Image (cartoon, helix red, strand yellow):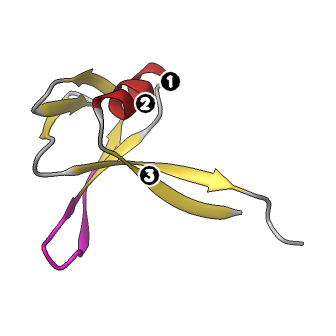
Amino acid sequence: MKRTNKVLKTDMELFGAALVQTHVYVVSVDEELRVTFEDYGGVIEEVKPESVKIAGKIFMRDQLEFRIDLVSGEDPE
């Protein structure tokens, strides 16, 4: 099974994740491309141009990344 993630950047991607109630987690990425886990997240409750509300917490879109896990393929036997 191959695991990867997708960064939700556009309004459409964020609204889509909210619609299907996909679990979204929150990370920050610094200028050296180091990823820091910020919050376990949850389901998106509200999307605004400047922020995203997840599990009762508000996160600023210009400071953080919102990601979902993607799983594809099958385990090799």
Label located before the other in sequence (1 or 3): 3
Neighbour class for label 1 at 10 Å: few (<14), some, many (≥20)? Answer: few
Which residue carries the number 3 mark? 6
Task: Name the amino acid type tagged 3.
Answer: Lys
- Queried whether the magenta region covers residue 75, the answer comes back as no
Q: Provide residue 12's location: percent of width, then percent of height.
A: 36, 28
Q: CA distance from mark 1 to mark 3?
A: 15 Å
Q: Residue at coordinates 9% horizontally, 32% vertically from top-left?
A: 50
Task: Name the amino acid type tagged 1.
Answer: Val
Q: Provide residue 34's location: percent of width, then percent of height.
A: 23, 75
Using the image as rendered, state which of residue 49 and residue 71 is in the foreground.
49
- Quadrant placement of the N terminus: bottom right
Q: Secondary structure at mark 3?
A: strand
Residue 8 lies in quadrant: top left
Query: In the image, 14: left or right of 47?
Result: right
Q: Is residue 49 visible?
A: yes
> Which dot marks residue 38?
none
Q: Provide residue 31's location: percent of width, then percent of height.
A: 13, 74
Q: CA distance from mark 2 to mark 1?
A: 5 Å
Q: Which residues are magenta?
A: 28-39
Which residue carries the number 1 mark? 20
Which residue carries the number 2 mark? 17
Q: Marks 1 and 2: in contact by CB < 8 Å?
A: yes
Q: Residue furthest bottom?
A: 32
Reply above or below: 77 against 68: below
Q: Is residue 43 visible?
A: no
Q: Marks 2 and 3: in contact by CB < 8 Å?
A: no
Neighbour class for label 2 at 10 Å: few (<14), some, many (≥20)? Answer: some
